[in-house]
Image: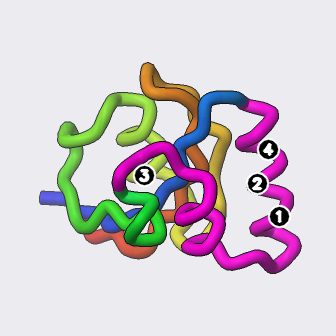
């Protein structure tokens, strides 16, 4: 069964999400941005979500994690919780 590890940053607006993505792409550390801005409890761990299988996260999140490029900052991804930036750290098929 497929498994993935990822980290994410959850914010309430698409604009904030885009601004943070720009910061990260300019060289700011993903984990530091997560600690400062993420509204998810995982923010205190730099956004790390650990390892999970398909179906354990909300559909929109799952689709990105199990199809997106590993190591790139993906998003904004809108879910019922808000807007996410996602970085896939590993994935097995």
Query: Can you say which quadrant of the picture contains the C terminus?
Result: bottom left
Q: Which residue is mark 4?
A: 18
How is the protein colored in the picture? Answer: rainbow
Which sits earlier in the primary sequence, circle 3 or circle 2? 2
Is residue 50 found left or right of 82 in the rendered image?
A: left
Q: Position of residue 14 (x, y in %)?
A: 73, 31
- Is residue 29 shown above or below 86? below
Q: Position of residue 67 (x, y in %)?
A: 46, 50
| Mark 2 and mark 4 residues within 8 Å of each other at the beta carbon | yes
Q: Which residue is mark 3?
A: 65
Q: Which residue is mark 1?
A: 23
Magenta-span inclusion, residue 25? yes
Which sits earlier in the primary sequence, circle 1 or circle 4? 4
| Mark 3 and mark 1 residues within 8 Å of each other at the beta carbon | no
In the rendered image, the residue lying farthest to the left is: 1
Magenta-span inclusion, residue 58? no
- Label for residue 20? 2
- Disc 3 crowd, CA 10 A, few/some/many (<14, 14-19, 20+): many
Q: Residue at x 27, y 70 (%)?
A: 92
**Closer to the observer: label 3 or label 1?**
1
How far, Cα to Cα, is label 2 from label 1?
A: 5 Å
| Mark 2 and mark 1 residues within 8 Å of each other at the beta carbon | yes
- Disc 4 crowd, CA 10 A, few/some/many (<14, 14-19, 20+): some
Provide the residue span drawn in magenta: 14-41
- Label for residue 5? none
- Is residue 24 shown above or below 12? below
Query: Can you say which quadrant of the picture contains the N terminus?
Result: bottom left
């Amino acid at each position: 069964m497929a498994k993935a590890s990822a980290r994410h940053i959850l914010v309430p607006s698409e604009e904030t999400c885009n601004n943070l993505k720009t910061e990260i792409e300019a060289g700011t550390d993903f984990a530091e941005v997560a600690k400062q801005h993420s509204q998810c409890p995982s923010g205190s761990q730099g956004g790390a979500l650990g390892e999970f299988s398909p179906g354990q996260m909300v559909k929109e999140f799952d689709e990105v994690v199990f199809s997106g490029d590993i190591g790139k900052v993906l998003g904004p991804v809108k879910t019922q919780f808000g807007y996410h930036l996602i970085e896939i750290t590993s994935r097995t098929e």
